[in-house]
Image (cartoon, coloured by chain):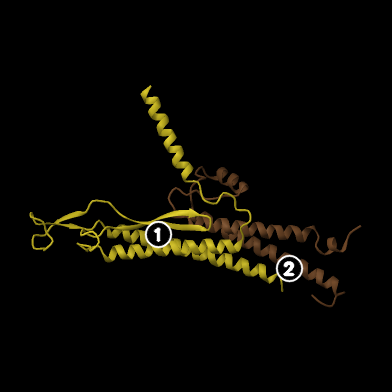
Amino acid sequence: MPSIENMIFDSTSRRLASAMQVAGEKQAMYAYNIANAATPRFKPLRFDEELKKATDKYSNEGEMSLEEEMALMSENRLKHSAYSKLLSARIQIAKKIMTLGKGG
Amino acid sequence: MRFIIESMLFIFIVFTINLSASSAVSSISGYGSDDAMTMSKSGILAQKVVLNLAAENVANATTLKTAETGLPYQKKYAVFEATEDGVKVRAIQKSTVPFKRAYDPGNPLADAKGFIQLPNVNIADEMTQMSVANVLYEANTTAYKSAKTMYQQSMEILK
């Protein structure tokens, strides 16, 4: 028996919200790495799956690369933008339903 | 035997250095785009310090005597440290590279043999440092703008 809460805030919305949260965390991580680009003996932070990808591609995983950080950061921003637009659309649909097609 | 002990000591020292190099932030969970803005801001301010010091070093490249030490000007440089909210200037240190010597008997600061001591500032090094700091400043500014856009987009969901 689906409750009203499950109909409006379904698993899609919840997943989008948590994806946005992860994107925010990643943005903080890239900002931290870039801010410490000139710190001696600094090793950049990485998410686990990225670390695996990086070790497949290059051998110098613990090294700081400004270009890589910037590229990953802009990719992350675009993803976040997509998630936020999708979530926005999901909320618009919920509004449409709640107002019987009038609002939203 | 002695060789083994020495090499073990060396390995121990290397490991200790590596441990001390581990970053201040171990897990990023709980951080958000607002923290990203704080971190980028700290990076911008740190690079500003580097730029200021490079300018000071270039300006004092021919200062033969400072009131503080009575010696020629010593090159200054910033030491960075990773903290929980980005980067921090831990200390501003003076370079201990030996002063250059030049023969200038007419100078009032010359010693008995007619030599003067020149600051340990290398102009080419300073220009390179400035250039690197400029690039890093811009990178941090871009990161800040990126975090700001993300924050704004999150806010627009409320509309």
Label 1 chain ID: B
- Amino acid, disc 2: Ser
Up/down of A97 relative to A79, above or below: below
Inter-mark Cα distance, 2 to 1: 41 Å
Q: Where is residue B105 in the image (x, y as percent from the top left)?
A: 8, 60
- Classify 10 Å Cα crowding around label 1: few (below 14), some (14-19), many (20 and above): some
Q: Foreground residue, B73 or A94? A: B73
Left or right position of B30 against A63: right
Judged from the image, the secondary structure of the residue bearing numbered disc 1 is: helix
Q: Which residue lies furthest to the bottom in this view?
A: A102
* Image marks 2 and 1: residues in contact by CB distance under 8 Å: no
Which residue is rendered at x = 35% and y = 59% of the image? B128
| Number of numbered markers | 2
Chain whose colour in the figure is yellow: B
Which residue is rendered at x = 70% and y = 67% of the image? A85
Q: Where is residue B145 in the image (x, y as percent from the top left)?
A: 55, 67
Q: Which residue lies furthest to the front in this view?
A: B68
Query: What label sits on residue B132 in the rendered view?
Result: 1
- Amino acid, disc 1: Val
Residue labelled with disc 2: A88
Q: Position of residue B103 (x, y in %)?
A: 12, 57
Left or right position of B112 against A16: left
Q: Foreground residue, A7 or B128? A: A7
Which residue is rendered at x = 46% and y = 42% of the image? B18
Chain whose colour in the figure is brown: A
Q: Residue furthest top?
A: B1
